[in-house]
């Protein structure tokens, strides 16, 4: 029997953070424009790794920009219009990639803004 390489599997305990995937929903504001709201799309187990921090001014106030790599099981229904939430923390998706070229894992480059 052929045994699958360990690179095909995500080790138990690696995906230990439950994140909420949120999808944008534009709602008419009554004045001819739209207001963006976010609705829950799904919940998913992920691994989060901090890559870099960048201190500076965000929206004219002191803050930091944090870049993370998020790893999850493969899913085809996610794109850069979605965002992820972990409690009060918001992660905006900057890039997505097939982590193992087998559509088993999805790697996301995300940005979190912290004040």
Image (tube, rainbow, N blue to C red):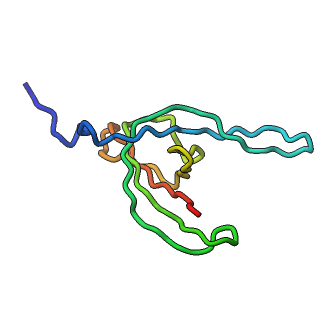
Residue farthest toward the top in the current orientation of the protein: 1
Q: Which residue is found at the position 46% from the left and 68% from the top?
A: 53
Q: Residue at x 39, y 50 (%)?
A: 48
- Displayed quadrant of residue 105: top left
Query: As rendered, which of 100 and 52 lies closer to the eye?
Result: 52
Q: Quadrant of the C terminus?
A: bottom right
Residue lying farthest right? 31
Residue toward you, 20 or 95: 20
Q: Is residue 52 left or right of residue 10?
A: right
- Relative depth, front residue between 2 and 89: 89
Question: Residue at 17% of width from left, 40% of height from top?
Answer: 6
Q: From the image, which quarter does the N terminus lie in?
A: top left
Q: Which picture quadrant has residue 100? A: top left
**Residue 9 spot, x, y in % from top left:** 23, 37
> How far from the left and from the top, in percent, is residue 66?
49, 63
Callout count: 0
Residue at point 86%, 41% (across, down): 29
Residue farthest along the left direction in this orientation: 1
Residue 87 at x, y = what percent? 53, 44
Q: Position of residue 14 (x, y in %)?
A: 29, 42
């Amino acid at each position: 029997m052929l045994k699958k390489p360990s690179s095909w599997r995500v080790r138990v305990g690696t995906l230990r953070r439950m994140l909420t995937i949120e999808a944008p929903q534009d709602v008419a504001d009554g004045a001819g424009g739209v207001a963006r709201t976010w609705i829950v799309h799904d919940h998913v187990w992920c691994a989060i790794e901090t890559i870099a921090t960048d201190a500076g001014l965000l929206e004219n106030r002191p803050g930091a920009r944090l870049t993370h790599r998020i790893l999850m099981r493969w899913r085809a229904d996610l794109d850069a219009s979605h965002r992820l939430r972990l409690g009060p923390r918001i992660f905006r998706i900057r890039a997505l990639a097939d982590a193992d070229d087998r559509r088993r894992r999805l790697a996301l480059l995300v940005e979190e803004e912290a004040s």
